[in-house]
Amino acid sequence: MNSKKWDKVATGVLYFIAGIMILILAFLLIYILVNGLPHVSWHFLTSSAKSFQSGGGIGVQLFNSFYLLFLAMLISVPLSIGAGIYLSEYARKNWLTSLIRSSIDILSSLPSIVVGLFGFLVFSIQAGLGFSILSGALALTVFNLPLLTRNVEESLNTISESQREAGLALGLSKWETVLRVVIPEALPGIVTGMILGAGRVFGEAAALIYTAGQSAPPLDFANWNPFYIASPLNPLRPAETLAVHIWKINSEGIMPDASQVSAGASAVLIIAVLLFNFGARYISARVYRRMTGGQ
Amino acid sequence: MKNYTADDKYIKALDPNKHELAIYTDDLHVSYGSSEAIHGVSLAFERFKITALIGASGSGKSTYLRSLNRMNDNIDGTKVTGKIMYRGLDINGPGINVYEMRKHIGMVFQRPNPFSKSIYDNITFAPKRNGLKDKNKLDELVETTLKQAALWNQVKDDLHQSALALSGGQQQRLCIARAIAMKPDILLLDEPASALDPISTSTVEDTLLALKDDYTIIIVTHNMQQAARISDYTAFFHLGNALEFDETSNVFTNPKIQATEDYVSGRFG
Ligand SMILES: Nc1ncnc2c1ncn2[C@@H]1O[C@H](COP(=O)(O)OP(=O)(O)OP(=O)(O)O)[C@@H](O)[C@H]1O
Ligand SMILES: [Mg+2]
């Protein structure tokens, strides 16, 4: 066969593989949405779960998911940006930095259930945080930080060395160059990574089962004092998230409408994750335009 | 390859009483890790003149040029010894504020490297960081530098478009405008026209000739005609040594060193 034919065959195979992936994704999405959306209502989204009767909602779990996500990102975003900048811009090539890089790679490939058990032992038991939002947020940070750090580092690495030289040759200090030349250019990539990371955290269950816990005590949405036990903001209360809720219903749910609640919750979860993904594309495109085109 | 010995040199001395020197190096050595790339180069550059650095690939022109504003500091493992004298100060010495020094000795690179910002911001970025805030002054700076770089007429209607949308030649002239917006004394250019087409190249050359009134220019070039056209002095580099330095007309018509003669006549190697 000549190379032209091979080219056609190879292209065909690639299209075929891509087609299969799209089909699987489409099937999953349609299946989950068709099964779940009929059960999603305003009541479902806002009321709290019921253990034994039907008609329970996912309001508290939904709130917990977002709050946990917020806290986890609050910790991991600044840390990952700092670590990523250090690794990309300042770290010299020596055994210490390659050790740090390998550690980050190993950490990022740990199964999340291992992170969860580690969080359970260290944050819940040793540090005495129990099953709490704080334990959960810390576990999520352990789960998320390596990936975010690598993302920041790689986004910065894609910026050509000539941009740094341009800044330095104008008499800017290294830090000014990093802060005002390199980071703005890398921002679309960094933001995309952060949002995709947020989506990953939002859908995470295994790392939270033994850290944030599996119970969602009713919340008093009238009291936002973080020290009050039923306050939504209290970081020391146990907080089952949406993903954990789905896992729990499917393994031991005994309410009569367990499968409907599970289907509805899955649909909400998948929509949220999709929103994160589309949001990432949209926002990074906007950031890119803002960064490159004048004011 | 023919062997040319480094002992056979002709470096014209510039009498400081007749020629005002902008910068000179004294026995400059540069090494990357354990290998030395510049083996003791002493050259002087006259103020408000254009000096061309020519020589074969790998002869150390970029290395030498980049050490003049200490851009090599940023490469791990480089070592620069010897003196670089600028305004009576050894800027290769300790205690020099490198960032401050680079405001006086600007640089334009081989590949155009505008920031991915607007044309306007590319030029005003560093002056703003330096404390120039007045909007009128900034506007004026953008206009004068773009005019000096022969770019104003092409971009004046759309100063806020992204610099990345410009052609390669326009980007390079923007980089020149950006460098002179800092009002440096000395402008170092490393093959600024090598990525450009002939028309853009000749525009850049005209730009440099016009800038000569206010700036001392040191330019690396592979293009012998370019060196002959625009420079007042030429230094010929070979294997990390400057073998000949003289007025450009002498270097091209009457070189004193065999290696230079072979190189400029294309019989090199
Ligand atoms: N970053 C670096 N690390 C190690 N060695 C380097 C580095 N840059 C240059 N060299 C070496 O230093 C020597 C001089 O290189 P330099 O780039 O200064 O030559 P040049 O005259 O500018 O060549 P060209 O005309 O190809 O640009 C070469 O042997 C090169 O391999
Ligand atoms: Mg070079």
Image: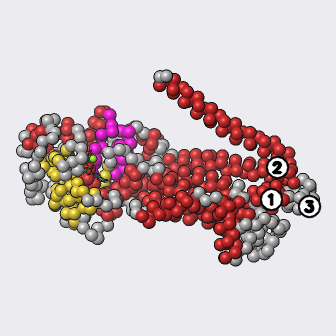
Residue carrying label 3: A52
Residue carrying label 2: A263
In the picture, measured across the screen, residue B56 lies left or right of residue A21, that is left
- Image location of residue B28, percent across then percent down: 19, 59
Label 3 beta carbon less than 8 Å to ligand 1? no
Residue at 18% across, 49% down: B239
Which is nearer the N-term, disc 3 or disc 2?
3
Q: Tags 3 and 2 in contact by the CB under 8 Å rule? A: no
In the picture, measured across the screen, residue A86 lies left or right of residue B107, that is right
Question: Per the image, is B172 magenta?
Answer: yes
- Image location of residue B23, percent across then percent down: 20, 58
Of B188 and A198, which appears nearest the observer?
A198
Color encoding of the figure: secondary structure
**Identity, as a three-letter code, of the amino acid under mark 2:** Ala
Of B170 and A199, which appears nearest the observer?
A199
Q: Quadrant of residue B167?
A: top left
In the picture, measured across the screen, residue A23 lies left or right of residue B44, that is right
Which chain does tag 2 point to?
A
| Residue B252 can be seen in this image | no
Residue carrying label 1: A248
**Identity, as a three-letter code, of the amino acid under mark 3:** Phe
Q: Secondary structure at mark 2?
A: helix
Question: Per the image, is A13 magenta?
Answer: no
Q: Start and end of the magenta stretch?
A: B168-197
- Image location of residue B51, percent across then percent down: 19, 48
Which chain does tag 1 point to?
A
